[in-house]
Amino acid sequence: MSLYCGIACRRKFFWCYRLLSTYVTKTRYLFELKEDDDACKKAQQTGAFYLFHSLAPLLQTSAHQYLAPRHSLLELERLLGKFGQDAQRIEDSVLIGCSEQQEAWFALDLASLHKPEMETELKGSFIELRKALFQLNARDASLLSTAQALLRWHDAHQFCSRSGQPTKKNVAGSKRVCPSNNIIYYPQIQVNLRELETAAWFSHDEVATALKRKGPYTQQQNGTFPFWLPPKLAISHQLIKEWVEKQTCSSLPA
C-alpha cells in the first residue's frame, strides 16, 4: 500500500512539475512577444488568427457545440485581398495567447467588412460571445473572452486622454503609446460600477476553501456570508479551479 501511495505521489508531483514548467515557458514566451515588436511580427508568420466582427467571434457549428476556427497569416492575407483590403489591416490584431509548442494566437476584428459576405466566405457565423459561451470548450471560451476584452479596450483608447492625439499600439497590442508625450496606456483589472456591484481580492487559501465548500451558503457568526463561486458547470468555475491547482503545484518543494 505504501509503495502504491509513493508511486502515485511521484506521478502527481511529476504532473504538477510538468504543468508548472509549461506554464512558465509559455509566460516567458508571451512576455517576449509583448516587449519585442520584431519577435511578435515573426510569430505572426507561423501563428494563428481568431476573427471577430464588431466584437462577435467567428464560430462554426459542430455536433451541438461551437468551434472557433483559426486562420494562418497566408489565409488571412488572401481573405483581406478578396475583400479589397490591404494586408496592413493585420497590424490591428492583438496577441491573446500561445500553445505549448509556442504557436502564437492573435485576434483581429474586421468590423469594417460586410458581415454576410464574410460569413459566407468563411463558412461560419459571427455570434455574440455571451450567447455562445456555454457551447464552447474551456480553452476557446477563455481565449475568446480575453480577445474580446482586449479588442474592446483598444477600440475605447484610440486617443490620449491628456493630449487628445491618436495613440499607437505595439505589435502585440499589450499597450498603446501617445507619440506626442510618450504616455503609455496598458489594459487594466478597474471596477465598472455600471456592470458590477463590488469587487475584492481573495487569497489562494480563501479561494481553495470556497472550492471545497459544500451545501448552502449560510450566514456566518459575524453576520457576513462567505463569497460565492460560480457553479461547477460554468466556465468561470473551471478557470478558478485551474488557477488554484497551478498555484498549489508551484508551492510544492523542489
Image (cartoon, helix red, strand yellow):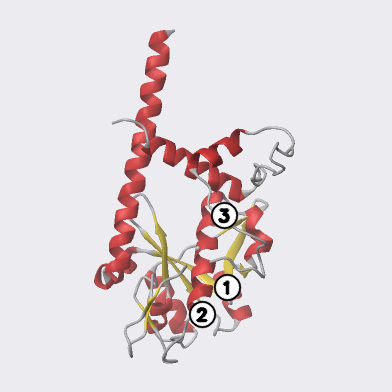
Query: Distance from label 1 to label 3 (Cα)?
Result: 27 Å
The x and y percentages for residue 29 are: 30, 57
Check whether the beta carbons of the residues at disc 2 and disc 1 lie within 8 A of each other: yes
Answer left or right for 229 relative to 153. Answer: right
Is residue 194 or residue 45 the one in the foreground? 194
Is residue 214 or residue 38 the one in the foreground? 214
The number of discs equals 3
**The disc labelled 3 sits on which kind of residue?**
Ala
**10 Å crowding of disc 2: few (<14), some (14-19), many (20+):** few
**The disc labelled 2 sits on which kind of residue?**
Asp
**Residue drawn at 41 percent across, 72 percent down:** 186
Q: Earlier along the polypeptide chain: callout 1 or callout 3? A: 1
Answer left or right for 206 relative to 213. Answer: left
Q: Quadrant of the C terminus?
A: top left
Q: Quadrant of the N terminus?
A: top left
Is residue 11 or residue 118 the one in the foreground? 11
**The disc labelled 1 sits on which kind of residue?**
Leu
Q: Is residue 119 above or below residue 88?
A: above
Q: Mark 2 — residue?
A: 155
Query: Distance from label 3 to label 2 (Cα)?
Result: 27 Å
Q: Nearer the viewer, mark 2 or mark 1?
A: 2
Check whether the beta carbons of the residues at disc 1 and disc 3 lie within 8 A of each other: no
The x and y percentages for residue 79 are: 46, 77
Q: Mark 1 — residue?
A: 55
The secondary element bearing badge 3 is classed as loop
Residue 119 lies in quadrant: bottom right
